[in-house]
Amino acid sequence: MIGSGVYFAVDGQTVKKLRSLGAKGAAEYIIQELEPLYFDEFPEQTFEVEEYWEAIHRALTGDFLFDGSEPMSEVILGGELLSYDGYIVSAKPPEQVSKLCGEIASLTESDFDKGYSAIDTADYPDKSAEDCEEAFGYLKDSLSFWRFAAEHGLWVLFTAEI
């Protein structure tokens, strides 16, 4: 079962630390240190997309792979992959964050629906009109988070247990 997805807006030093810890260490650091700190002290620098991150990624890219058409393929799994062994950590640099913020802001529900409707139910059995609506809602609700990160020159981490 896919776990809840969480975005964190962090500074460059945090990304350097995660890189230095390696894949397993980065995941442990996020779970044990970053999550409690950011949820308590920096709530404006976190955004939970719950389990809808998979639907969002598939609707924007057409697949579950770590590639696809930029820039929208970068929203969830894109960027620098810091961990992918039971726990995904991808990092997007500030210049990419600004670009993605604009792309998310301009994405229409119709465009999202078109991408979502192309998802193969064999790959994503949770596909439904309600799931599509919820996923789009979470993506649009994340816009204030992306704006904050862009305005403050922060990196965006996407994390999820898989």
Image (spheres, rainbow, N blue to C red):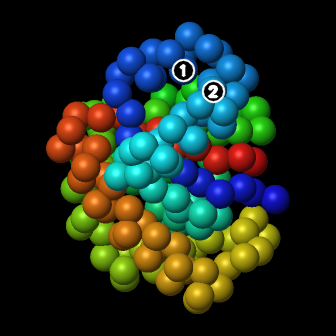
> As drawn, is 113 to the left or to the right of 127?
left
Name the spot of residue 37 as percent of width and height, x first.
51, 38
Please tell me whether residue 94 is drawn above or below residue 125 in the rendered image: above
Question: Which mark, residue 29?
Answer: 2
Which amino acid type is shown beneath numbered disc 1? Leu
Please tell me whether residue 81 is drawn above or below residue 18 in the rendered image: below
The quadrant where residue 36 appears: top right
Name the spot of residue 30 as percent of width and height, x first.
60, 33
> As drawn, is 88 to the left or to the right of 74?
right
Name the spot of residue 71 as percent of width and height, x first.
35, 48
Circle 1 Cα neighbour tier, 10 Å, few/some/many (<14 / 14–19 / ≥20): many
**Observer-nearest of 67 and 148:** 148
Which marked residue is nearer to the observer: mark 1 or mark 2? 2
Which amino acid type is shown beneath numbered disc 2? Tyr
Taking the spot 64% from the left edge, 16% from the top edge, the residue there is: 22
Residues at marks 1 and 2 touching, judged by CB atoms closer than 8 Å = yes
Task: Say whether disc 1 or disc 2 marks the residue closer to the N-terminus.
Answer: 1
Taking the spot 41% from the left edge, 51% from the top edge, the residue there is: 43
Q: Mark 1 points at which residue?
A: 18
Name the spot of residue 18 as percent of width and height, x first.
54, 20
